[in-house]
Image: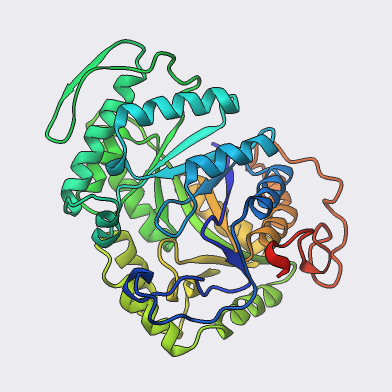
Amino acid sequence: MNVHLHWFLPTGGDGRTLVDRHAYTDGGIKRNRITPVSGVRAPDVEYLTQIAKAAEQLGFEAVLTPTGTWCEDAWLTTVALAQHTDRLKFLVAFRPGVISPVLAAQMAATYQRITRGRLLLNVVTGGDSTEQRRFGDHLDHDRRYARTAEFLSVVRGAWSGRPFDFDGEHYRVEGGLTALPPDPLPDIFFGGSSAAAGPVAAAHADVYLTWGEPPAAVEEKTDWIRGLAREQGRTVRFGIRLHTISRDSSREAWATANRLLDDLDPETIAAAQQALGRSESVGQQRMLALHGGSRDKLEIAPNLWTGVGLVRGGAGTALVGSHAEVADRIGEYHALGVEHFILSGYPHLEEAYWFGEGVTPELAARGLLSTVPASPLLGVPAANGRPASAPGGAPLLVADGR
C-alpha cells in the first residue's frame, strides 16, 4: 500500500494568514463584523491555475476542491482547470441534497470524458443546517445521512449501464441511467464522524476521510469503519485531511506556525469559535475539542498542531516540523492503514512547493511512493529561506497584485 498525495484548491480565497476573508458573524450573512485581512488572494482562475500546475509538477495526484457558500462552484472551476493541466485529477466536493442523483451521475460521466478520466468525488452530506437551508435543504442531521445513502445507491445504479429503478424515502427514480457510464468509475470519498455517518461510509464509500486527529483517535475511527464495512461484505480505504508547515528545520517550521498565530487576536478567535460551535457536525466538534478555543498547548501530539482550527472550520490541524519529521508523521498514519493524504497550507502555492520539494523526496526514499515526480528543481538550494521554485516566496502572478 503506497501513499497517495493530494493537494487543495482554495476556491474561497487564499493568503498569508489563517484569518478567513469572510466574516464569522451569522455565517458571514449580515457582515456586521468584518476583520481586516492583509495578503489575501482572490480565487480567480489565474491564481488557481498556478496552484493546479504546481501540484501537477510536484507529483500530487489530485487536488480537493471544496463546496459551500463561500467557494466557487467546484464542478465548473475544476473542469476549467482541467484544460490547463495534463495528468492532475480533481477531487470535486459536492452536496448530494441539492442535486438530483441521476443528474450527478450524468455530470460525472460527462466530466470523465471531457477530462479523460480525471474525476474523483467527495460527497459532503453537510453538518451545518444554516448552510443547508441556504440551498433549500431543510432535513435534520441524521436524515441528511439517510438521504445520502439513497443518493449514492441511485448514482451507482445509474452507472450500471442499464435502466435502474429506485423507490426510497427521499428519491423515487424510474429507469435512471447514464447513456455512457463514466470510464473509469470515479472513486467516492466520504467523511463523517457521527453514528449516522458510519454505516453510509461502510456501505458506499471507496475512501473514508477523517480530519487530522492524533494517531490513536484515527486508529479508533478506522477500526470502527472497517468493522462496519466488514458487516456489509466490503472493504474501505482510508484518507486523512491535514494542513502542513514543512521547512528545512523544525525551528523554521514552528516559527512559521507562530507567525500565523500573530494574526489572531482574541476577538477574532472568539468570533470564529462561537460560529463554529453552532455546527451540528460531530467531526467539527471533535476539531474544536482538540484545542478548546485556547492558544495554549496547541501541539496535541508530536508535530500535530491545532492552530488552524482556532479560526477555520473543517480540517483544523497541521503537521508542523522539518521535512523528515513531517514524513515521520505521515509514515505513522500510513502504518494505521491511511493511504490518501489530502494536504494544504497557507498560502497554498508556496506551501505546495515546500512539501513537494522537501517531504516528497523523504517519502520516496522510504519507499512509500510508487512514483517520484521528476523536477529539475528538486535538490536546488533554497534562496532566502524560500523554495528555489518560488524565489523570494512570491508566486509568478498574484491576484490583484497582492
Q: Taking 244 as reference, is 82 above or below it?
A: above
Which residue is the extreme one toward the bottom? 266
The spot of residue 238 in percent (x, y) is 43, 43
The spot of residue 380 in percent (x, y) is 87, 56
Quarter of the picture holding the N terminus: top right
Which residue is the extreme one toward the left? 169
Count of numbered circles in the view? 0
The image quadrant that residue 237 belongs to is: top left
The spot of residue 127 in percent (x, y) is 28, 57
The image quadrant that residue 164 belongs to is: top left
Residue at image location 59% in from the left, 74% down from the top: 17
Residue at image location 47% in from the left, 78% down from the top: 298
Question: Between residues 308 and 129, which one lies in front from this camera angle?
Answer: 129
Quarter of the picture holding the C terminus: bottom right
Q: Taking 369 as reference, is 288 above or below it?
A: below
Q: Taking 238 as reference, is 38 above or below it?
A: below
Q: Is residue 147 left or right of residue 310?
A: left
Question: Between residues 320 and 192, which one lies in front from this camera angle?
Answer: 192
Question: Between residues 349 and 138, which one lies in front from this camera angle?
Answer: 138
